[in-house]
Amino acid sequence: MITFLLLALACFVGIVTLLTYTLYCYEETNQSGQPLAPFLAMAGRTALRSAASELAIVALHPLGLWPGLWSKPTQDRPLVVLVHGLFHNPGAWILFRHRLHAKGFGTACFGYPSWAVQWDETVAGLAAYLTKILEENPDRPVHLVGHSLGGLLLRCALAQMPNPRIRTLVTLGTPYGGSKLSPFALSSLGRYLAYGGETVTRVAALPTPAGVRCLALYSPADNMVMPNSALRCGLEGWEERQTRPVSHVAMLHSKDVFDEALEWMRRSA
């Protein structure tokens, strides 16, 4: 029975990877006017790792259901608050979190349910969580990292917090312009991510508090945010960097992506 479930899961992840990269190649070829071959080659180089990352996220999902493992700040060091993306939970950060601990940072993870919740409700919960973190850790430098939807939630939450004591904000694969895959999210927070839609347009107009150094990392092989140009934040005062080609989910596991985020946080010191 377990073997059957594992095989079914592997087949499902493989189908999702194939479909999303097929749509990626189609979309980027039409958007850029370039030949199909370079996008097929990029998809071929990243698809296997994408599937492996997806399987790891699913396997670790049960760990993320235990709030006590994630929500309380660890270690008396500079603190990084991590906010996951759509349909994930704090368990998605396990490798990123391990690497941060090894580099001298403490961590705390904010978790939220992707289904049957409202945008404003989720943002308010995150703002309250960050406010509590800052109050309970007045002498610790605080950094923020958000993956995918988590990056947009952090932007909204910061706009609701007057003069937050935050050093940096780093986003990984955040759909600043939304995504054409949003309709497939059905009745979840994903419905707010319509490409060029009302929510992402409203978020783009929000101010970033002064003193927060912001970095948007995006991959040229992102298979969940379509078109790829929707990953570009285009916000005043932000720096944008293109990473090496990795899939949307594999950004959480990529050593290169981690090193970019780490270097940005260390520079703020």
Image (cartoon, rainbow, N blue to C red):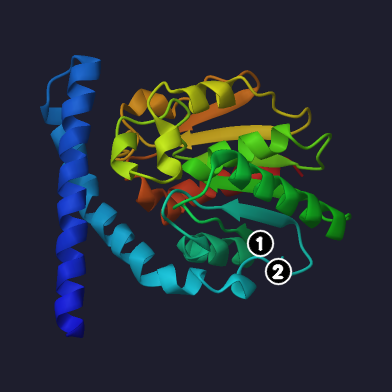
Task: Give the residue drawn at x 40%, y 26%.
Answer: 230
Task: Give the residue drawn at x 66%, y 61%.
Answer: 108
In this view, the residue in front, 214 or 24, is 24
Q: Is residue 186 above or below residue 253?
A: above
Task: Give the residue drawn at x 66%, y 21%.
Answer: 237
In this view, the residue in front, 32 or 61, is 61
**Secondary structure beneath label 1:** strand
172 relative to 108 in the view: left or right: left
**Secondary structure beneath label 2:** loop
Q: Quadrant of residue 206?
A: top right
Rendered location of residue 196, percent (x, y): 41, 21
Q: Quadrant of residue 194?
A: top left
According to the picture, the residue beneath numbered tag 1 turns out to be 107
Crowd class of label 1 (few under 14; some 14 to 19; many from 20; radius 10 Å) = many
Q: Quadrant of residue 192?
A: top left
Q: Amino acid at mark 2?
A: Thr
- Quadrant of the rendering where the C terminus is positioned: top right
Query: Which sits earlier in the primary sequence, circle 1 or circle 2?
Result: 2
According to the picture, the residue beneath numbered tag 2 turns out to be 74
Rendered location of residue 169, percent (x, y): 64, 40
Rendered location of residue 249, percent (x, y): 37, 50
- Quadrant of the rendering where the N terminus is positioned: bottom left
Rendered location of residue 93, percent (x, y): 50, 61
In this view, the residue in front, 1 or 27, is 1
Dot 1 and dot 2 residues touching (CB under 8 Å)? yes
3 relative to 159 in the view: left or right: left
Task: Give the residue drawn at x 60%, y 49%.
Answer: 262
Q: CA distance from mark 1 to mark 2?
A: 5 Å
Q: Amino acid at mark 1?
A: Thr
